[in-house]
Image (cartoon, helix red, strand yellow):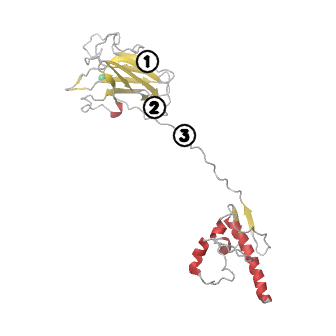
Amino acid sequence: MTSRSSSQSSKASKRWSRRQFLARLTSSAGVVVFGVPSFIAGTCHPSPRPNSSNSNDNTNAGQSRESVEEPVPGREPVLTEQTMQEPGVGPEPQASDGGLQEVLLREPTPEIPSKQEPFPEPQRCALTEDNIEGPYYRENAPWKTRLGEANEPGVPLRISGVVMDASCQPIPDAIVDVWQANNKGSYDNDGQNDPPNQAFHMRGRMKTNAKGEYAYDTVVPGRYLNGDTYRPSHIHYKVYAPGYQTLTTQLYFAGDPYIKGDAFVRPSLVITLKGANQSQTGEFSIVLSKKA
Ligand SMILES: [Fe+2]
């Protein structure tokens, strides 16, 4: 080996160390290198491997970058993309000899976000649809949870439910005001009971408890003619709560043959009763909208 080739080898060794160092820095998270030629700092493509048996083999460059080459004793390890991208692989970087004007700005190492529990989505309850009030509402119904008489004719029916807000939170002390026809389809103020029944027959108001629950006992309402067709069996509701919009709606029962031809029924207001003809139960929960 001549002195010139020895000098070139030494310089090459120094270049490799510098490139290697810069490559390691640019491949490390949070390190930005300024003033470095892009072919070194940006692409991290090493020069052809010294003593390579095929230094012009550019077609295999991609393959060589994809693999990790085994270090050869006495030879500088060849940098590959994989070794550059994997911290801790390859020799430790050496201090710069000042041959290049480098400004290194070390940014704070970004923290790897720890696995966090997903923030619970607010539970949403669909607002109860409103429905027509009709002509038979009477104000100031008494506070009671049995709408009819103790021996009221008809199929006994118990309705229960929860009054809540759109976040599915119960609303205590909400007022549930209900009214309905008797089992013959007659309201106490529809002209067939004149003067109107002062006992507010088949009507009542109640308040929800601390869990937003309400319940009342009645009988399955009879149908009545509305023009030339019967309205399906139904119970009227008005629901009040401070801070919420008053809801006027109706409750219908699945299986009623007159539901299909009724212009006012909404599917969301139809419930399925349980039980036999001797006694039936149903659940009807109500979701109120907060006042703006
Ligand atoms: Fe009605």
Expressed as whole percent of the image width and height from the top left, the position of residue 169 reads 50, 30
**Label number found at residue 289:** 2
Disc 1 or 3, which lies upstream in sequence? 3
Q: CA distance from mark 2 to mark 3?
A: 22 Å
119 displayed left or right of 212: right
Amino acid type indicated by mark 1? Met
* Residue 231 quadrant: top left
Q: What residue is drawn where x is 26% and y is 28%?
A: 256
Describe residue 243's horizontal placement relative to residue 89 as left or right: left
- Classify mark 1: helix, strand or loop: strand
SS type, badge 3: loop
Q: Which mark is residue 206?
A: 1
User: Disc 2 marks which amino acid?
Assistant: Ser
Among the 4 quarters of the image, the one containing residue 69: bottom right
Mark 1 to mark 3 CA distance (whole Å) = 34 Å
Looking at the picture, which amino acid does disc 3 mark?
Pro
Counting residues from the start of the chain, the first of labels 2 and 1 encountered is 1
Q: Is residue 89 above or below residue 210?
A: below
Q: Residue furthest front?
A: 73
* Residue 232 to residue 66: above or below: above
Who's the residue at 68% across and 83% down the image?
51
Quadrant where ligand 1 appears: top left
The residue labelled by disc 3 is 120
Q: Residue 260: percent from the left, percent from the top?
A: 25, 33
Q: Are marks 2 and 3 in contact (CB under 8 Å)?
A: no
